[in-house]
Structures are given as structure tokens and as C-alpha cells.
Image (cartoon, rainbow, N blue to C red):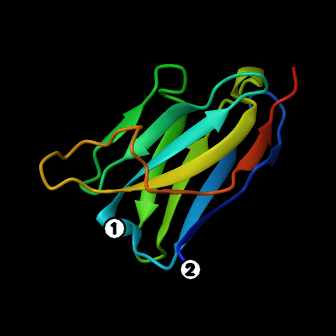
Amino acid sequence: QLQLVESGGGLVQPGGSLRLSCAASGFFLDSYDIGWFRQAPGKEREGVSCISRRDFVHYVISVKGRFTISRDNAKNTVYLQMNSLKPEDTGVYYCAAKRASSRSPFCEYYGMDYWGKGALVTVPS
């Protein structure tokens, strides 16, 4: 069964850190671009960060300099290190995988093939 499982969410005070993990089973992440998305209460889901198969990374401006995405292909896992967390970072965080394009080295936030069920991150105000 092909699936992605997020872990590492929780409650953290402003300024704190969390590391989210996205573990794949049934397929190998090294053939995929991976995106992290989040959905804040009452808002639409948004892309936060992505990493391509060729390790191109992208961050939305609201997390740039605070979040770091990385992959460990040996563990078939992608991580999102989140530092200096703010209340506006609160939400359910999802990882998603998209089969990598042979034409582009970049990652994107649409057309994802597989989704995890999400991990809740809460940063109280």
C-alpha cells in the first residue's frame, strides 16, 4: 500500500522548534518531488516548502529563513525543520509526493500524486 505518514507535530510555544517527518511506504521518495503544505483553521491549504528530486528547494516567504526542508533517501523520509515558530504557523501540516519531471529540476505545489493525513502543529498566541 502506497502511503505517506507525517509525524512530529505538537504544541510548542512561540519561538520554539519542531521537526516534522514524512515517511513513505510502498514507494521510494527519491523518484519524487515532495511538498509540505499546511492548512490553518478557517483557511485554505497552502504550499509551504518543497524539495525536488534533484534537491532544489523552495520556501514561501512567510517561512523562509525559519524552516528547512531536507530528505534522507536511505530512510525514505523527508523532514521539515521548523524554528522560531509563530502563532500564525498553527495548522495541520501535510506532506505530498509528486513523481518528478524529467524536464524540470524544480518542485511545484500542484499535481501531487500522494498525500499524507496530516500532523497538527499548534503555536499558541
Q: Are marks 1 and 2 in contact (CB under 8 Å)?
A: no
Q: First in sequence, mark 1 or 2: give its number.
A: 2
Q: Residue at x 40, y 39 (%)?
A: 110
On the image, numbered disc 2 is attached to which residue? 1
Q: Residue at x 54, y 55 (%)?
A: 79
Residue 14: quadrant of the picture:
top right
Mark linked to residue 30: 1
Identify the secondary structure beneath mark 2.
Answer: loop
* Coordinates of residue 55 in the picture (x, y in percent): 29, 52
Task: Name the amino acid type tagged 1.
Answer: Asp
Task: Name the amino acid type tagged 2.
Answer: Gln
Image-based side of 102 in relation to 108, left or right: left
Would you say residue 16 is visible in this rendering? Answer: no
* Coordinates of residue 86 in the picture (x, y in percent): 72, 24
Q: Assess disc 1: are there few (<14), some (14-19) or many (≥20) residues with their C-alpha within 10 Å of its C-alpha.
A: many
Residue 50: quadrant of the picture:
top left
Image-based side of 47 in relation to 13, left or right: left
